[in-house]
Image (spheres, rainbow, N blue to C red):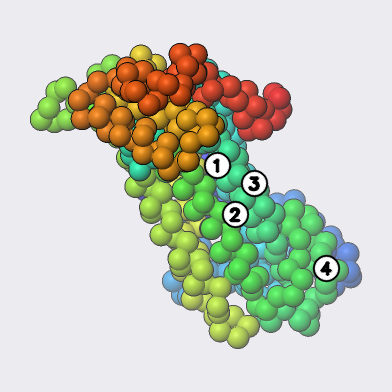
Amino acid sequence: MIARYARPEMISLWSDAHRYEVWWRVEIAAARALARAGKVPADAIERCAARPPVFDAAAVSRIEEIERTTKHDVLAFLQYCEEQVGTDARFLHRGMTSSDVLDSSLAVLMAEAAGSIDEALGRVLAAVEKRAREHARTPCIGRSHGIHAEPTTFGLKLAVWYGHLERSRERLRAARERIAYGKIAGAVGTYAHLSPQVEAEALAELGLKPEPASTQVVQRDRHAEYFAALSLVGTAVEVVATEVRHLMRTEVAEASEPFDPGQQGSSAMPHKKNPILSENLCGLARTLRGMLIPALENVALWHERDISHSSVERMIGPDATTTLQFMLHRLAGLVERMVVFPERMRENLESTHGLVFSGALLLLIADKGSARQEAYRAIQRLALQAHASRTHLRPLVESDETLSQVLSKDEIDRAFSMEPHLAHVDAIFARVFPAAA
């Protein structure tokens, strides 16, 4: 994790100290289940639970010191626990393999991280909905291929963002459910020294479900799905950020990131206001997607397990979740404080001199009985003339001998009206924001 792109709560979640705390919770949950099964003394386990080891910076340092000798992180952890707790700790880890601890604790951490990301997504969605409603009927030009198409509203742009983000949240929640599976099934998942009942009880205490059939590890398709969901959330962020970058361009200037007092855009050009937040988000989205490929490659492990996935997950688990949570809070702040310029939107909408209403004219003429291609060519001829001469399309239509005989003034008024483009805003909002329908 890079501190520049990390928030304190996620740094804490993925800290060594918290990871060891979760390992301890796994060990105690398993030991209690074993005690209920009569495999270990219950009083010894409760004495362990009553005086857990301290997991602070000194503890992390001591575990690392032990690991330099053992070359095994879980054994170093268990030795530290025995140093802290005493001889009762010898009843921990009975019949378990290291991955019982590692995979179950990783599931806990990934579920916790998903919860924090979900909370951040909620903030983004609230901000987008608020601004969408604020600009539900603020006219602006819609663009396809980067070229003026037909009118839309700025609120409808944001409604599209909201739908994308909401679907991303649904995927994240599904992936959180799918990742919340652990295993306490022993060296190759056969429960040779444990039992499915012990596993189920221990994992329930941790808020997890048992992997139906495991090897030494929980199967990594679960993890790949999780990272895919994170990547898709990041892509939804990039969709918004890319649009903001375009809208902030000098030639467009329809919306802008906030620019705070004292902020400076360029070391060389004092006039600059650059889209630094949205550009940053696009870059982070690329980085996030890059973490998906190793997660997919982790799925195929040798036989009952190898550890080629381990080093990957130690990196991408903290990095992907921390980066995405940071991105979402940055995006929320951007949307909450985004400056919108309705007057400039109107100027851009009118800058092509009525060409954006050519589709309505086409339909009107076609409805009069003309062949569609004939009508298309007639309107295109006038549209190209208006574009070349930088004159408004409407007087060209009104003065055209053929079209003026086909279309009435009222029909031309309707063709050049914004009303059809606003007529269904409420219906669209009711589908996107059903709670307020």
Discs 1/3, front: 1
Residue 195 in the figure: left or right of residue 85:
right
Closer to the chain start, of discs 2 and 1, is: 2
- The disc at residue 198 is 4
Q: Where is residue 306 in the image (x, y as percent from the top left)?
A: 54, 80
Residue 199 in the figure: left or right of residue 107:
right
Above or below 36: residue 260: above
Residue bearing the label numbered 1? 164
- The disc at residue 170 is 3
Q: Are marks 2 and 1 in contact (CB under 8 Å)?
A: no
Point out the residue furthest to the left here: 268
| Amino acid of disc 1 | His
Above or below 41: residue 246: above
Closer to the chain start, of discs 3 and 4, is: 3
Q: Position of residue 187 (x, y in %)?
A: 68, 80
Residue bearing the label numbered 2? 110
Closer to the chain start, of discs 1 and 3, is: 1
Mark 2–mark 4 distance (CA, rounded to whole Å) = 23 Å
- The disc at residue 383 is none
| Amino acid of disc 4 | Val
